[in-house]
Image: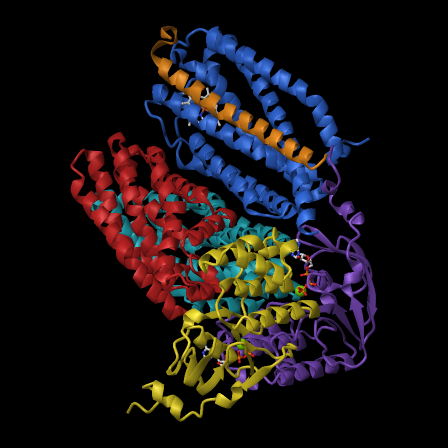
Chain colours: A cyan, B red, C purple, D yellow, E blue, F orange
Amino acid sequence: MLALLQRDLRLALRAGGGFGLGLAFFLILATLVPLAVGPQPDRLAPIAPGILWLGALLACLLSLDRLWALDAEDGSLDLLATAPVPLEGAATVKALAHWITTGLPLAVIAAPLSLLLFLPGPALPWLALSLLLGTPALSWIGTFGAALTVGLKRGSLLLSLLVLPLYVPTLVFGAEVVRRGAEGLPVATPLALLAGITLGCIALLPFASAAALRVNLR
Amino acid sequence: MLALLQRDLRLALRAGGGFGLGLAFFLILATLVPLAVGPQPDRLAPIAPGILWLGALLACLLSLDRLWALDAEDGSLDLLATAPVPLEGAATVKALAHWITTGLPLAVIAAPLSLLLFLPGPALPWLALSLLLGTPALSWIGTFGAALTVGLKRGSLLLSLLVLPLYVPTLVFGAEVVRRGAEGLPVATPLALLAGITLGCIALLPFASAAALRVNLR
Amino acid sequence: MEFEARSLTCRRGEATVLEGVAFRVRAGEALILRGPNGAGKTTLLRTLAGLTPAVAGEVTAPPEAMAYGAHADGLKAQLTVAENLAFWAAAFGTGAEALARAEAAFDLAPLRARRAADLSAGQKRRAALARLVLTGRPVWLLDEPTVSLDAGNTARFAAAVRTHLAAGGSALIATHIDLGLPETRVLDVARFAPTGRQAAGSDPFAEAVE
Amino acid sequence: MEFEARSLTCRRGEATVLEGVAFRVRAGEALILRGPNGAGKTTLLRTLAGLTPAVAGEVTAPPEAMAYGAHADGLKAQLTVAENLAFWAAAFGTGAEALARAEAAFDLAPLRARRAADLSAGQKRRAALARLVLTGRPVWLLDEPTVSLDAGNTARFAAAVRTHLAAGGSALIATHIDLGLPETRVLDVARFAPTGRQAAGSDPFAEAVE
Amino acid sequence: MSIWEYANPRRFMAASGAVQPYVWGLAILLCATGLIWGFFFTPEDFRMGHSVKIIYIHVPSAFLAINAWFMMLVASLIWLIRRHHVSALAARAAAPIGLIMTAVALITGAIWGKPMWGTYWEWDPRLTSFLILFLFYLGYVALWSAIEQQDQAADLTSILCLVGTVFAVLSRYAAQFWNQGLHQGASLSLDAEENVADVFWIPLVITLAGFVFLFVALVLLRTRTEIRRRRLHAISLKERLA
Amino acid sequence: MSWLGKYAFDILLAYGLTALLIGGLILQSVLAARAARRQLEERGE
Ligand code: HEM
Ligand SMILES: Nc1ncnc2c1ncn2[C@@H]1O[C@H](COP(=O)(O)OP(=O)(O)OP(=O)(O)O)[C@@H](O)[C@H]1O
Ligand SMILES: Nc1ncnc2c1ncn2[C@@H]1O[C@H](COP(=O)(O)OP(=O)(O)OP(=O)(O)O)[C@@H](O)[C@H]1O
Ligand SMILES: [Mg+2]
Ligand SMILES: [Mg+2]
């Protein structure tokens, strides 16, 4: 199990992936948005919380598509399924590795980046905290989506169609935390809901992922 | 050449891809943005042109990652490179197939969807026209980016990193056309620039793509 | 390890490929699966490995006793040979000793530090076969193991199988060539081709619906 | 078609794998490449096919004369066998007649309507080999063509090669097994292993930089 | 004889073939009655004018859009637990109907919104969660059609349906949290119009019943088609693998 | 259509689009059913 985590992290670092890229995508998005919608601070500031959360969502999504597909193609998924590791455990570890390589660095770095979008200062810690609490849900949901589409050769658009609607609650509560933080309102409720969703995903989705994988391996 | 186009379109339709999915992604994005930034029309309307163009960008990007990688993995890229088809031609055809499956349907359907973001009525035809003129550039640039990253196993984030900066001019002029259209200003200049970029991309990038492929095949 | 399969029906995708497969493998014995291309050797091995559930019938050994070596190598191209093997050793909970044995059996020491992507086809195959030694499992299920191996490495592989059998293990090997293993029996998979009539049983749509 | 390679130096990735390769193939002749795993057979074939430029030396036949059959099958899993072959026939500009010949040579008629994903390993291999007939090119470069083929299909393959040679074509075949082709010469690739000293020539960083 | 007998494709074909005409008859009768009554013979609402007539398609379609998903959920569970093929195919058959019903509810709601709220689209929680439901349907249909092997597709879509239900409910709640919205408060409340309630209610209930029968009829018809297609698939499989 | 009042356009649009969508769905269902049955009959069932 630990070995799987280690292997996945190592692969992520070596295979043209790595911690940096999720961040880089996030940075590019934060640059493109002003280019697209116009540079006025009074236009950017109110949409900053939402855009930052959307960026996190898309960064997760982009790094997701080959989560299982690579293992399926080179035959290691077959071998993993016959190894004495429950597939549920493998799914958990995959999601964890995905989170460590995308969600975690995002949570760490998002706050400084958000200045590009003129996010008000008081919201910064809430942005970091909400990402820290919310991104695990994104990784776990994404692992499930990737398990569903592992057999498809060009699954990435279908994957996004399946996964993005599942991201809605996380996005809503996450962005709400930041928005309330920016306006100085209490954030306890959305934060608790966010944490609840994450916990639920971590507890239940590995079973769904493993079931989907087993069906796909048949 | 025609055979290649036919094969690519057929594959796109069969392998969990298809015309519909790019649109679905676009629709999802149009739903997620208000969920993220808030539902107020006066907040959404001004950012609508930019967001819609960003959505087109991302829809293109998502369907891009396996453009060449699939051919490389199953060995057909090697065979294609030794077939009596110039790689430049193959690159053009790939880009064209990509545009037909993503850019073209997007240009057709974006206008009705833009109502969700309260894009002002006068801007609708300009949105459609700018997408029609601009999305080919996205496909051709994307084909080049995919050729650069074809050897990497987890290239999709790196690909986005390479490609998104190249998308900037298209994005800026495209969004500008729509914004001016929304405000009733003349749109000729950005439209001409957009068309110029697209023509330049179509004329020159296949050579770059083919060169990148040759290096990657070595 | 001794085990038996009784009237096994196997499917691949949506097709019933084998019916009524029955055989017995004794400890220390290798059973060679023969059959023309498309006969169902891969299908049978996947069923025994527990990847595809059998439609009917039973196997007396659990999937946990089986080590499956597939057509595909299952190597991560970006990892070195040593890293690849260490991962599988950890996944199967066998220690450094098994690792050393596996490396020795397939002479992988010179390749340890190479990325799997930089190996030739036969070198990849050797690394993939070494994994079997690592699993420490009693039954080896091998699908055309000697593909791309040269004569020297084929002999190495045969030696590894012999060692495994001598230690009381058993093996099922699908192959088209002669491996030079002593004391093997051959099972012709083509014998179990479905008769068509019985295949209907598992899919209610195989008969007319109206 | 007759051609010759003269003092060819081939590289794979960043390593020089072969040096001073020289051979001549006459029309109607098949040259068998032998050599242990990792000797450089694949590297040589890729160089001849024009996929990897040679570091030094020359080949008298252009890449356009070569039809390359690689380790990988080059089939699109989502397309049927017929669609796959039709695509390659169109890409090489050979017509329906070549298509029919290719199908006949490897007995693909029963598999025409199958998706490539639903084929067994040997069936895929047959479809991949049929592509060579389609190309209509005079020189076949084959990298372990008989992998996963059963005895019957290996004979079919040998017959296809013989037909090709009889029509004045030639072939380079890397293989570890005996194909039963008459009149073949063997080239031992291991002879051309780089001596190390000369390999330095191509990489400016091979010598000390200070 | 237990109800599960009908999950045998042949039994189902026989039984559904027998009841189908009656269901279609009822559906057409009820829909026609309700819609004609509602369209031609109801008075003007004092606040909404004649635009209230849109209710006769808006509410039934919205009702079905939600309940089709629950039917799919139940069918998926039956497939996963008892492995009755007809059940999986019924879920598959219902999805496009749910998709269209969702689209109808969205479109009629949007059109109704113009006179009532002065805008075609409003990010109201109910509307938003409907849009998200539409996306769930799309994903479900897309997944079905992307996978070649039918039983595998049935399994995967069933799992998706289970997980999707949980998230659809969560999204509904999230949307409510995110925006208080117009739909109930600002629109007509049927309770506030007790005086004319019957006038609007009776045709509405009739249409609603008609739509339910229409749904059942369509599900039967489409399930029969799916069964035939599945049979065709089995035949072509046999031919291809011969 | 004056009896529909000032909302005539909206009402007719709503009914029209609905008829189009649901009608299309029914039509598609019927055509698909017929096609499947015919194909089965061609194969002798
Ligand atoms: C795109 C826009 C709209 C959507 C997606 C939508 C959706 C819904 C939904 C889901 C229901 C509940 C059906 C049920 O549970 O049985 C409903 C009911 C209803 N809607 Fe809408 N609606 C929209 C616009 C409108 C507008 C503009 C009005 C009128 C001003 C309206 C009036 C009603 C009424 C009167 C009901 C029945 C009352 C009830 O059961 O709560 N809707 N709609
Ligand atoms: N996904 C699938 N759906 C339907 N049939 C399949 C599928 N995959 C394989 N088959 C068929 O099942 C049969 C058995 O395949 P299998 O791979 O077990 O053969 P094999 O004996 O391993 O052959 P080979 O020696 O070529 O590897 C073949 O006829 C093949 O065409
Ligand atoms: N990308 C690479 N970088 C460096 N060395 C490589 C690379 N790929 C292969 N090699 C090495 O080059 C040598 C020749 O490889 P090649 O694949 O040509 O061997 P081969 O004769 O085809 O062997 P096999 O019979 O196993 O297929 C091998 O020693 C291999 O390890
Ligand atoms: Mg096989
Ligand atoms: Mg080789």
- Picture quarter containing residue F29? top right
Please determine whether, in this image, residue E229 is positioned above or below residue C149: above
Residues C26 and E127: in front is: C26
Q: Which of the image's four quarters has the N terminus of chain F? A: top left
Is residue E146 left or right of A170 when viewed as pictured?
right
Please determine whether, in this image, residue D199 is positioned above or below residue C195: below
Where is residue C89 shown, x and y percent of the image? 62, 75
View extreme (front): residue: D167
Is residue E38 left or right of C12 when viewed as pictured?
left
Residue E7 in view? no
**Which residue appears at 63% of the width and 77% of the height?**
D181
- Picture quarter containing residue E165? top right
Please determine whether, in this image, residue E69 is positioned above or below residue D142: above
Where is residue E68 shown, x and y percent of the image? 58, 31
Is residue A176 left or right of D152 when viewed as pictured?
left
Please determine whether, in this image, residue E156 is positioned above or below residue C93: above
- Picture quarter containing residue C140? bottom right
Q: Which of the image's four quarters has the C terminus of chain F? A: top right
Residues E54 and E170: in front is: E54
Where is residue D2 shown, x and y percent of the image? 47, 78
Is residue A67 left or right of B177 when viewed as pictured?
right
Residues C75 and E47: in front is: C75
